Image: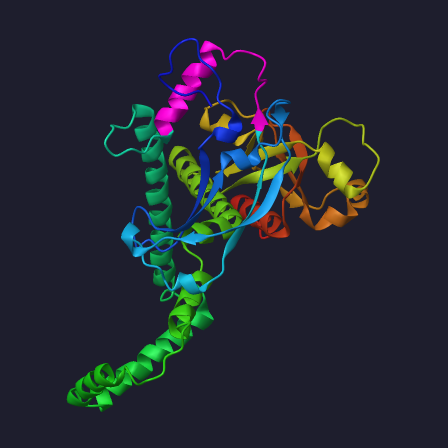
Amino acid sequence: PLPPGAASPLSLMDWKRSRAVFKLTVYGENPFNSFLDSPWGSVVIPLRDLVEDERRGGLQREKREWHRLAWAGREDGVDRYNHEEDDAALLVRMQLELRESRKDPTEQEIEASRAIQAMLDRNPDKAQSAMSTLWNLRENVAFVQNHMGRMLDTVESFKNVFNWTHPKRTACVFAILLVTWVAFVLVPGRYLILFAGMYEFLRKWIPEPEDQPMSRRLNNLLRSLPNDDHLRGIYQREHEEFMRRKNQREKEKQRAAKLHLVMDCQWEGLVKIKPTSASTPAGSGASQAAAWPSRYLVVQGHRLVWWVKEEHLEESKPPEGQMLLQGHSGTTHASPLDLKLMADLAPQLVAVFGRGVRGEPIKHTFLCNSEEQKDALVGVVAEVVGKKDA
């Protein structure tokens, strides 16, 4: 170590003469004992014990030893908890790496040594450095934050005892409360006060277990119940899926309301329309359906209108196609070839015929997403053309 304030030129002390120590402190988890500082005990390891060969420098031999824990006493402001009867020890593995002793210390090493010495200086008569103050403040803030988090988790677990987060445990708690209420109703209050007073006087002769099983059971009950953060993590996927479906329903309602506000339509939905090209790809019904483009279909008055996407309707773009449901018009079955190629999707196929904008007869085949959607489309078209062809 480099002694601070030494005259120049500086000389290095022998590691065997160093009085520096490593102090490992064990802290308890009970925040009600001492809110900011609750050490149970400590282990002190002299730095010189880690030095094997200071002339060689570099990595020294690793030390792996058991060290007895020295319990903190009441003079430090901490209860002993009868720890003097325990035989606790810490298994510590430490290895020291020394700098090369043949080289003179650099200015950076000297300043670093002085900074470390200032941080380790615990003399109450001297003002601590700003670095030491910030370091201790960071540790205290982290300690308080962790204990506040544990306290809030305990409060949330206590709240979840009564809101059926765990139905079995909540039922047991309510059953105990019901029995207690019945006891208070049936037993006069003066007897309860008498029993409480007698217990206070006779508690000295009543044997009590050392481990306090009731408090341990209550602690286990609270620890077995999840807090709100755990519940959010457990049901995160279900919550995201629920919110996605809810937002999707809200968007569909808004689009439907906007559509009915702009135009009075009897039916609307996403369907697939058979392409007008004569080429028919080979494959199963699913591959055939994949080749059909998706369109947004609307029945408005005596017209059947479709757009490429629903957004095109909202952007007031012209429709891709339309059909007039006047004269000889209505619905029928799809062609035998379509029914053969798409046998597994045949109940969802429907053909609608009518007239084009120039009065020519036209016919289009649509693939609905479900049989219910197909039946609704057929019913609306039949109502429009004055037929009852389902």
Camera-side residue of 67 and 233: 67
Query: Which quadrant of the view contains residue 358?
Result: top right
Check the image and report above or below for 130 versus 282.
above
| Residue drawn at the location 33% of the way across and 34% of the way down | 136
Check the image and report above or below for 91 versus 318.
below
Camera-side residue of 378 and 228: 228
Task: Give yes or no for residue 208 being in the magenta stretch.
Answer: no
Check the image and report above or below for 167 versus 209.
above
Q: Is residue 308 visible?
A: no
Q: Position of residue 35 (x, y in %)?
A: 29, 50
Chain part drawn in magenta? 97-119
Q: Position of residue 245 (x, y in %)?
A: 49, 46
Task: Give yes or no for residue 114 being in the magenta stretch.
Answer: yes
Camera-side residue of 83 and 209: 83
Q: Residue furthest left?
A: 190
| Residue drawn at the location 72% of the way across and 28% of the way down | 276
Query: Which quadrant of the view contains residue 264?
Result: top left
Q: Position of residue 98 (x, y in %)?
A: 57, 24
Residue 286 is left or right of residue 217, and the answer is right
Camera-side residue of 183 and 99: 99
Q: Is residue 22 visible?
A: yes
Residue 295 is left or right of residue 224, and the answer is right
| Residue drawn at the location 22% of the way across and 81% of the way down | 200
